[in-house]
Amino acid sequence: MKTFLSVVGCFSLCLSCLQTNVLAAPNVIVIYTDDQGTLDLNTLGSKDLVTPHMDALFESGVHFTQFYGAPVCTPSRVSLLTGMSPQRAGLDGNVSATPGQTAGLSSELFTMVDLFENAGYNTAHIGKWHLGFSEDKKPLAHGFDYSFGHLVGCIDNYSHFYYWRGPNRHDLYRNGAEVFHDGAFFPELMLEEASAFITESKDDPFFLYFAINLPHYPYQGYPKWLKYYDEQGVPYPRNLYAAFLSTQDEIIGQLIQNLDTLGLREDTIIIFQSDNGHSTEERAHFGGGNTGVFRGAKACLFEGGIRVPAAISWPARLPSGGSRGQLSSNTDWLPTLAELCELDMPDTMIEGKSLVPVLRDPQAASVHDGVYHWEFRGQWVARDGRWKLLGNPVDKSAKAPLGENDKLFLVDLDNDPGELTNLASSYPQKVETLKQSYLTWKNSF
C-alpha cells in the first residue's frame, strides 16, 4: 500500500506528523448508477419504491434537486472523470462496442483518477467502464491500481455476456485479464470486489469508483422484490424496474455497512449520482422510471433526460439532511473533491466548479453564474437561469407532441418545469441571445 503525502506538508515534518496526515486524509467512493430516473428514490418522492439504504445516504449528507449529467452513459462518465463537457473532452456519444473500436477516453486528459493517484491514494474501478476497450483506453491505462468489471455498455448479470449488437461475447475482466464467474450475479461480484479492496486499503486512503450497472437493462431484480412489487400492484414495467432498483439498494446498503464495520464511514466521502435519466428503449420494456412533472428520458435534453438524483455525504465534515437547488453538474465533482481533500489541481482546462460554497451555505449563489450548455446527436441546449432554449428537441418520454415550429423550443423553467409550453415566438430576442451563446460555445473547441 502506498503512503499518502499531504499536499500542504513540508519536508521538515516529522514521521509522526506525517502519519497524522495519513489518518486525516478522507477516503472517497463515487457510486455511479446507470439509467436511474430523476425522482427514483423513496426520499425523492417515489413512494412506491423501497430504497432505505439510498434514502439514508441522501439524508446523511446534502442532496441536489437541480443536478445534471449527460443524456447517455459515455458522455456522462467522461464529464464525471474529467470535469469537462463531453464535447471538450472529445466523447459526445456512447463508445461503440464494435470489435476493433479505438475510440475512448484519452489518457492525455487529467482525470479524477489522476487527482488521487498523484496524492498517493489506492485507486480502484469496480463495475461498468464504457470509456473504451482498446489497451490504451482501459481502466489500468488511466491510472487505476485495480479494476474489475465490464468494458462496454451493458451485460447480462449472470452470464456476463454483451448481447446488444453483433455476436454475443463475454465481457468481464479483472486487471485487464478476462475472468469467468458463470452464473454469479454481477452486482454481488462488484460488492465482493469492492469490499475486498476497501478492507485491503483500510489503513491507507483510497478512491473507489463504484460504477454499478443498475437499473440499466436487462431488468434482473431479486425474485423477492419482483414478488413484492407484484403483490403491491405496481404496474408493468414499473414493477420490473422497481425490483431492480430495490436490488441495487441492497447492494449499496451492504457496501456502506462494510465501511461501518471497518470504522471508516465517518471519514469517507461518498458521492452518489445517476449518469442520465431512465431508459424508454425496447430492452427496458419501454420505461419504468419516474420523472414526475419533468419531461423527457435518457437520450434527450429535456429535464427528464439529464436532471438526475445526486448527493454527497461526509459525516465528519458535511452537514446532514440538507438539499440544494442551485444548478450543479457532474463536471463539478472533480474540483469539489480536490477542495474537500485539499489536493492540488493542475493548470488544466475544466468547466466544472467546486460546489464547496454551496455545500457550506444553502443560500449561496450557483457556482455556474453564466450560460450552461449541452449537446447530443443534433440536439442542443443553452440554459441561462430560468430560461432554457432547446434546439431540435427530442422527447423520449412522449409526454407531448413536438411540431415543425418546435425546432427552437424556449422554456421558462420557473413557471413551466414540465417544459410543455414553447415560448419562442413570444420572446424572439431571448431565443436569439441563447442561440448565439450556444454557437459561441460550440465553436470554442
Image (cartoon, rainbow, N blue to C red):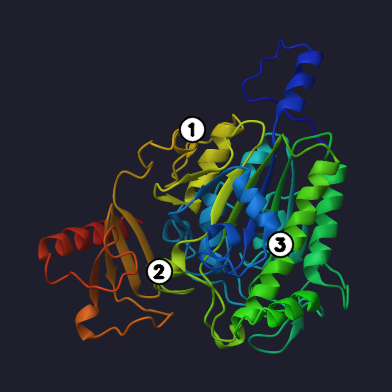
Q: Quadrant of residue 153?
A: bottom right
Up-down: is 64 above or below 413? above
Left or right, 361 with respect to 261, comes to left
> What residue would you read off at disc 3?
249
First in residue order: circle 1 vs circle 2: 2
Tell which residue pokes out farthest to the front in this image: 232
Which mark, by number, is residue 82? none
Kindly identify the amino acid type of the residue bearing the numbered disc 1: Arg
Q: Quadrant of residue 307?
A: bottom left
Q: Quadrant of residue 415?
A: bottom left
> What residue would you read off at disc 2?
294
Q: CA distance from mark 1 to mark 2?
A: 28 Å
First in residue order: circle 1 vs circle 3: 3
Taking the spot 47% from the left edge, 36% from the top edge, the residue there is 347
Taking the spot 87% from the left edge, 43% from the top edge, the residue there is 200
Up-down: is 308 above or below 361? below
**Residue 133 picture location, percent across and down:** 67, 68
Which mark, by number, is residue 360? 1
Q: Secondary structure at mark 1?
A: helix
Taking the spot 83% from the left edge, 52% from the top edge, the residue there is 195
Q: Is residue 328 visible?
A: yes
Which of 227/326 is in front?
227
Kindly identify the amino acid type of the residue bearing the numbered disc 2: Phe
Q: CA distance from mark 2 to mark 3?
A: 24 Å
